[in-house]
Amino acid sequence: MWVVVPVKRFSAAKSRLASVLSEAERESLAQAMLNDVLRALGQCERVSGFVVVSREARAGYAAERSGGLFLDEATQGLSAALQQAGHWLAQHGRRDMAMIPGDIPLVSAREIDQLINAHRGTPAITLVPNREREGTNAIAVSPAEVIPFAFGAGSFAKHCQAAARVGIEPRVLELAGVALDIDNPLDLQSLLTHDAETETLAYLCDSGIARRVMPRHASARDISDSAAASRLL
């Protein structure tokens, strides 16, 4: 299956982190997270190829370095970008697709392969919600235009409702790495409790951001892994 990775311009990314990160830091964070996602895609067994959809030139360079393709985003907005990518894939003989966002740095190749393995049949819809089960952090669809995409507030419920309207029972997967998208300071703190070999965590620690954003008196309960805690010392 082909995977679509929609990416905002880095300069416009992660505005909800403006209270703790400078614009330059948010841009670097967006780049690091995308690199982690593309690295995971490159390690997958079930991914036939991937395409990054964006107006961000640096995202295009990252896609090419990772062996993917780049599609210049025609209309801003995640739902519109996926519609564009689905049409492009259909023109090239691909009827199905999956979407993996560029801001889930803990995603693994195993989880992406699990999503694709779980997605069977046509028509079919497979969803991975975020931790709050409010947003849609990954989706696989066959065919690509089986439902209109409805990303934004409440997208998980909206996609479930859209599936019901066309008579499809969506398959729902809980995947921990996919579920953690980095949108606000609490997400950033949660990310820092994990011990993983990612470019994102390396950047946060090496830049000093980790020390700055974690609570001064974080307890062992706040830091779920002692190895992760050691990165902050």
Image: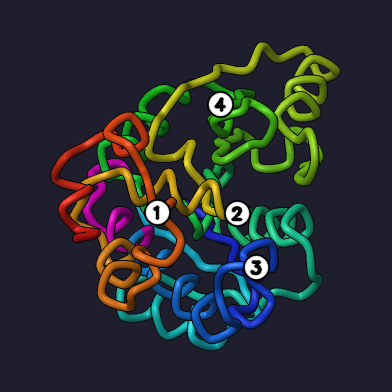
Disc nearest the viewer among 2 and 3: 3
User: Which amino acid, mark 3?
Assistant: Ser
Whether residue 40 appears in magenta in the rendering, the answer is yes
Q: Are marks 4 and 3 in contact (CB under 8 Å)?
A: no
Q: What element carries label 1?
A: loop
Q: Please give left or right for residue 216 compared with residue 81 in the image.
A: left
Residue 165: image location, x then y, percent: 85, 18
Residue 7: image location, x then y, percent: 59, 67
The numbered mark, 1 or 4, whose residue comes first in the sequence reads: 4
Q: In which quarter of the image is residue 16?
A: bottom right
Q: Please give left or right for residue 217 compared with residue 130 in the image.
A: left
> What residue is pinned by disc 2?
183
Q: Please give left or right for residue 226 compared with residue 96 in the image.
A: left
Q: How far apart are marks 4 and 3 (CA)?
A: 35 Å
Residue 19: assigned label: 3
Q: Distance between the residues labelled 2 and 3?
A: 12 Å
Q: Do the residues labelled 2 and 4 touch (CB within 8 Å)?
A: no
Q: Identify the residue at image location x=81%, y=20%.
A: 161
> What residue is pinned by disc 1?
216
Residue 126: assigned label: 4
User: Which amino acid, mark 2?
Assistant: Asp
The residue carrying pointer 2 sits among few (fewer than 14), some (14 to 19) or many (20 or more) residues within 10 Å by Cα, namely: some
Q: Nearer the viewer, residue 132 or 37?
A: 132
Task: Examine the rendered structure and indicate whether residue 42 appears above or below residue 109.
Answer: below
Q: Give the range drawn in magenta.
A: 37-47
Residue 26: image location, x then y, percent: 54, 75
User: Which amino acid, mark 1?
Assistant: Arg
